[in-house]
Amino acid sequence: MTKEHINSAFDDDLNELAKLITTMGNLALSQFTAVIDGMADDEVKLKSLIENDKKIDHLESEIYNKTVEIIAIRSPQANDLRRIITAPKIATFLERIGDYSKNIIKRRERMIAEDGDLNILKKVNGISEIARELLIDVLDALSRLDAKKAKLVWEGDEELDAQHNIVYKKIYRGMVEKGSSASDINALFIAKNIERIGDYCTSIAEQIYFIVNAEMLDEKRPKTEI
C-alpha cells in the first residue's frame, strides 16, 4: 500500500472518530434540551430519554473500540495521537451528561408521582440555560478544535457555580421558613445535576485545550463556596 493510501485511510479513521463524537455530542445536547424545555410540564417522558441514553451508551463503546483500532493499526503521533487518546475521555464525559439529564427527569417524575409542586422548578430555569449554553459552546469548540473558545467555556462554568449556589440558598431558605418537602429535596438534586453537567463541559474543554496546545490548563479557576 502506498504512503498516500495509508494517509488517506488514516484520515478516514480520524474523520469517522470525529463523526462518532459529534453524533454523541448532539444526542447529549438534544437530550438535555428536551429535559429543560419540558421541566415544568409532563411532555418529556422518561421512556424516550432512556432510549436516547442507550444510543449514547452505545456510541461511547463505539468510540472506545475505534480508538483502540486506530492506535493498534496506525501508530499515530503528536497532534493526531492527542485527538485519539482524548476521544474516549470526551465520550465518557458526554455519557455522564446524558446520565445527569436522565436523572433530572427521574426526579421530576418522582415529583409528579408524589403530587409535588412543579412550580419550584422555575427556580432552576436560569442555571439550566447557562448549562445549555456551556454545552452548545463546548461542542462547537470541539468540532473546530478551538482552544480559545474551550477556555471561555472553562472560565464560564464559574458563573454556573455561582448561580447554582444562589438557587441552592433560595430553596434551602424556603425549607427553613416553611418546612421541607419532597419537592424541595428533588429540586435541590435537580439543581445539583445541572451544575454537574457544567462541570463535565469544563472537562471536555480541558481536553480540547490539551489537543491543541499539548498541555493541560494549569490555571486554577476558583470554585464558589455555598
Image (cartoon, helix red, strand yellow):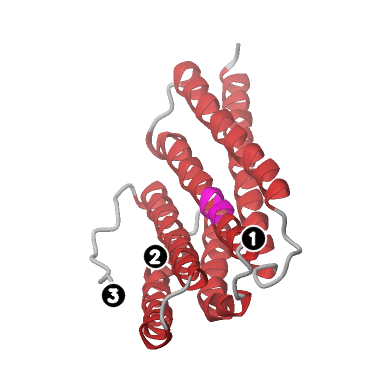
- Element on which disc 2 rests: helix
User: Mark 1 or 2, which is nearer the eye?
Assistant: 1
User: Mark 3 or 1, which is nearer the eye?
Assistant: 1
Q: Is residue 110 magenta?
A: no
Q: Alpha carbon of mark 3 to alpha carbon of mark 1: how far?
A: 34 Å
Question: Which residue is at a point 29% across and 52% down the rendered structure image?
Answer: 216
- The residue pinned by badge 1 equals 113
- Residue type, label 3: Thr
Q: Position of residue 157 (x, y in %)?
A: 40, 69
Asked whether residue 14 is in view, the answer is: yes
Q: From the viewer's perspective, is residue 204 above or below residue 5?
A: below
Q: Is residue 99 magenta?
A: yes
User: Around disc 1, counting alpha carbons within 10 Å, would you say few (fewer than 14), some (14 to 19), or many (20 or more)?
Assistant: few
Q: Which residues are magenta?
A: 98-103
Q: From the viewer's perspective, is residue 65 above or below residue 136?
A: above
Q: Alpha carbon of mark 3 to alpha carbon of mark 2: how far?
A: 14 Å
Task: Indicate which disc, 3 or 2, sits on the residue closer to the N terminus.
Answer: 2
User: Around disc 3, counting alpha carbons within 10 Å, would you say few (fewer than 14), some (14 to 19), or many (20 or more)?
Assistant: few
Q: Residue furthest top?
A: 1
Question: Which residue is at a point 52% across and 44% down the rendered structure image?
Answer: 95
Q: Nearer the viewer, residue 146 or 113?
A: 113
Quarter of the image with the C terminus is bottom left
- The residue pinned by badge 3 equals 224
Question: Which residue is at a point 53% across and 80% down the rendered structure image?
Answer: 123
Q: Alpha carbon of mark 1 to alpha carbon of mark 2: how far?
A: 37 Å
- The residue pinned by badge 2 equals 154
- Element on which disc 1 rests: helix
Q: Nearer the viewer, residue 3 or 203?
A: 203
- Residue type, label 1: Ala
Left-right relation of 124 to 188: right
User: Around disc 2, counting alpha carbons within 10 Å, would you say few (fewer than 14), some (14 to 19), or many (20 or more)?
Assistant: many
